[in-house]
Image: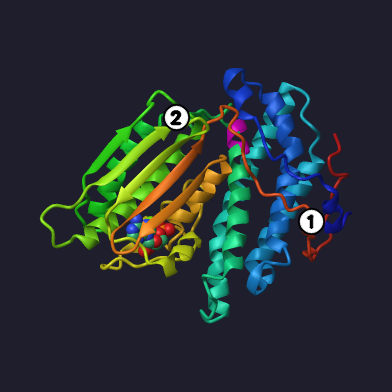
Amino acid sequence: MIPTSALQALPRAATSVLLWQPCRKNPQPLLTAQFLHQELPVRLTQTLKIVNASDVPFGMSNLPTFRRISENLLDDIARLSRTPRPMCQVQEVSFTEQLQELQHRQEINNQSIGHGLQELLDISKKSIDLNDKRLKLFFDKYYTMALGTRTILSEHLSLHEHERSTVEKVSPLDVAKKAAFDARRVCATHYGLKAPEVEIISKNTSVSPLYIEEYLHRSLFEILKNSFKATAETHRNSTRLPPVKIVIVAGGEDVTIKVSDVGGGIPMSKIDNLWGYTYSEPSENGSFLAGKNTNYGMDIPLAGFGPGLSVARLISRYFGGDLNVVSMDGYGTDAYLHIFRQQSCLENVPEYEDTEILFEPEEPMQVAALGSA
Ligand SMILES: Nc1ncnc2c1ncn2[C@@H]1O[C@H](COP(=O)(O)OP(=O)(O)OP(=O)(O)O)[C@@H](O)[C@H]1O
Ligand SMILES: [Mg+2]
């Protein structure tokens, strides 16, 4: 029986995992399973710390939903710690089955975060400031950690289930074309707006950085959707909409994708709010909920309420890149998406080693010695 304080002793998460490189060239399921056996308790403990950190605002950690998430995380850490380190193929297969269930439970946890926010709004009678910086920080940390956990799990699970999205070499030009096509369709069907034309200028097209194609598509799709919407609304009385321009350039360290529109820009006072998870300007027909299923496969239930850009930035930062928005209010907006080019494709996950876990479960846990082989 151990108290949660014993979890403080776990080492911090590995900050740069090169899991997928050996995976792709020479699949070694036993090796990646052993890595996950060691790494996952650390990641889940970090997530537990994020949910229970003293800087989580509005007493969220004590709301029933967040307490349930903490209980689930503790339960998963306990299950992993009871499982012996896989040492042969048979054990690897059985451990992988356990990981499939664990990923499913993680997805449920991630979905619950959105319910937790709803719970907070209900309890506070909507008096919560959704632009509170601590709230944004909480979502940044939680979703980055969730993205990291999901990514390393998927890399291993893809060795058994081939339809999973994994890290691979992607063509930014091809992905941009597809994202533009899809965003134009959504603009017409969901917003009822005619989308502007897209002009693409691409240099060094042979460069193909490592990324999860689905995530790059999603990020560009979100940026383009915003540009189309702003352009169509600003120029609604024009006979011809000004085009949205995409410029793709491979530099020495990164590939930058710039998306430029002349959709009227964003007021300076609203720029900071862009990076929150709950900021959204309803479109004129009130249809901004159209994107509610656009959750990056990360089960972010808040999508459609304004996390489009925030999640796109979180993903690019996780892969070592960035997303910046520069706007000229009264004219238009440029979004710069940077993709880190190094073939090692480092992952960036937050480190919170100093945070104490304040959560204590109602029932004491039965946990075998953590990290026991
Ligand atoms: N290119 C742009 N031009 C003008 N305003 C923009 C642009 N990009 C973003 N915005 C403003 O920033 C807000 C937040 O954008 P974001 O994509 O994060 O959320 P959203 O579009 O409101 O909702 P969703 O989650 O469905 O994308 C938008 O509502 C819009 O007001
Ligand atoms: Mg958007």
Instruction: Characterize the magenta stretch by its predominant secondary structure.
Output: helix
Left or right, 211 with respect to 259, comes to right
SS class, disc 1: loop
Kind of residue sitting beneath label 2: Val
Q: Which mark is residue 354?
A: 1
In the rendered image of this protein, does residue 187 appear above or below residue 280? above
Amino acid, disc 1: Asp
Residue 267 quadrant: bottom left
**Between 284 and 295, the one nearer to me in the picture:** 284
The earlier-in-sequence mark between 1 and 2 is 2
In this rendering, does residue 304 appear at all? Answer: no
Q: Please name the residue shown 65% across and 30% down the image.
A: 18
Q: How many numbered discs?
A: 2
Residue 157 placement, left or right of 287:
right
Q: Position of residue 121 (x, y in %)?
A: 53, 75
From the viewer's perspective, is 186 left or right of 251?
left
Farthest-out residue, left = 239
Highlighted magenta segment, given as a residue range: 152-156
Dot label at residue 170 = 2
The quadrant of the rendering that contains the C terminus is top right
